[in-house]
């Protein structure tokens, strides 16, 4: 089961990009599998319906012809029933025609039963595929939520680190330790990059970009850093 996150909790902190890639791979595979199975099952269901309807159309023609033959045979039997021996032959003809008609009707009903089974099997597979899709999309939205919560928590952590680094560099520089201030800022550069923070002359003097700009300018020129 996929790891969960409670935002800034320990479990969220332990997630890596590889964990997110694994989550994404799992829900994508399940959705792809479910969609393929759903498409195949729906096509199979429609094919079974078409197959039966085509057969039914052909068989209706056969049944209609057999019924016409039976009607004719019964008419001849009724017309010549008084003729000895000939009437027996006509009775046999009626029976044989009736048997052919019954056979054609049974063949149609047998095909109908087979189609019902095929359609039921396809519908069962459709249900399974839809369940897989629902699970896949549920995993997808869960993964998106986990990633969003993780990034939100991680951003807060990085922002706190950036603020601490700037404050430490400020303290170092105002204490006459220029090299140390430069080392602190250099070490924190990866954090600044992750947050897209850079020295900005147009930023508020109280913001991290504004403070960075003032501090870096002082480091470059040797000017006294403002306080307060």
Image (cartoon, helix red, strand yellow):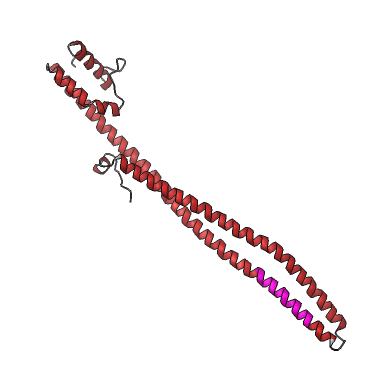
- Please name whichever residue, 148 or 71, is drawn nearer the observer in this view of the structure: 71
Q: Quadrant of the C terminus?
A: top left
* Residue 171 visible (yes or no): no
Above or below, 147 relative to 90: above
Question: Which secondary structure dominates the residues rendered in magenta?
Answer: helix
Give x and y (percent) for residue 171.
15, 20
Q: Is residue 22 visible?
A: yes
Query: Residue, x 27% and y 26% (percent of image)?
Result: 192
- The magenta stretch spans residue 201: no
Viewed as shown, does residue 206 lie left or right of 120?
left
The part of the chain drawn in magenta is: 92-108
Q: Please report the residue visible at 26 percent of the width from the left and 44 percent of the height from the top.
A: 11
Looking at the picture, how far across and down is residue 33, in whole percent? 45, 51
| Image coords of residue 197 (percent x, y) | 29, 24
Choose top left, top right, bottom left or bottom right for residue 184.
top left
Give x and y (percent) for residue 9. Answer: 25, 41
Q: Is residue 74 left or right of residue 108?
A: right
């Amino acid at each position: 089961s996929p790891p969960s996150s409670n935002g800034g909790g320990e479990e969220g902190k332990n997630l890596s990009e590889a964990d997110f890639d694994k989550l994404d791979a799992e829900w994508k595979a399940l959705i792809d599998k479910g969609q393929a199975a759903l498409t195949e099952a729906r096509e199979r269901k429609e094919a079974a319906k078409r197959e039966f309807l085509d057969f039914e159309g052909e068989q209706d023609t056969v049944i209609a012809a057999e019924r016409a033959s039976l009607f004719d045979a019964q008419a001849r039997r009724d017309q010549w029933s008084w003729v000895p021996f000939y009437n027996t032959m006509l009775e046999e003809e009626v029976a044989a025609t009736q048997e052919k008609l019954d056979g054609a009707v049974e063949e149609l009903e047998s095909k109908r039963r087979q189609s019902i089974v095929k359609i039921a099997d396809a519908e069962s597979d459709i249900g399974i595929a839809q369940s897989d899709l629902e699970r896949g999309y549920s995993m997808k939205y869960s993964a998106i939520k986990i990633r969003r919560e993780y990034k939100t928590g991680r951003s807060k952590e990085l922002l706190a680190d950036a603020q601490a680094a700037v404050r430490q560099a400020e303290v170092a520089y105002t204490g006459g330790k220029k090299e140390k201030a430069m080392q602190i800022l250099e070490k924190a550069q990866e954090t600044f990059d992750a947050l897209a923070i850079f020295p900005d002359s147009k930023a508020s003097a109280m913001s991290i970009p504004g403070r960075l700009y003032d501090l870096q300018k002082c480091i470059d020129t040797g000017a006294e850093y403002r306080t307060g």
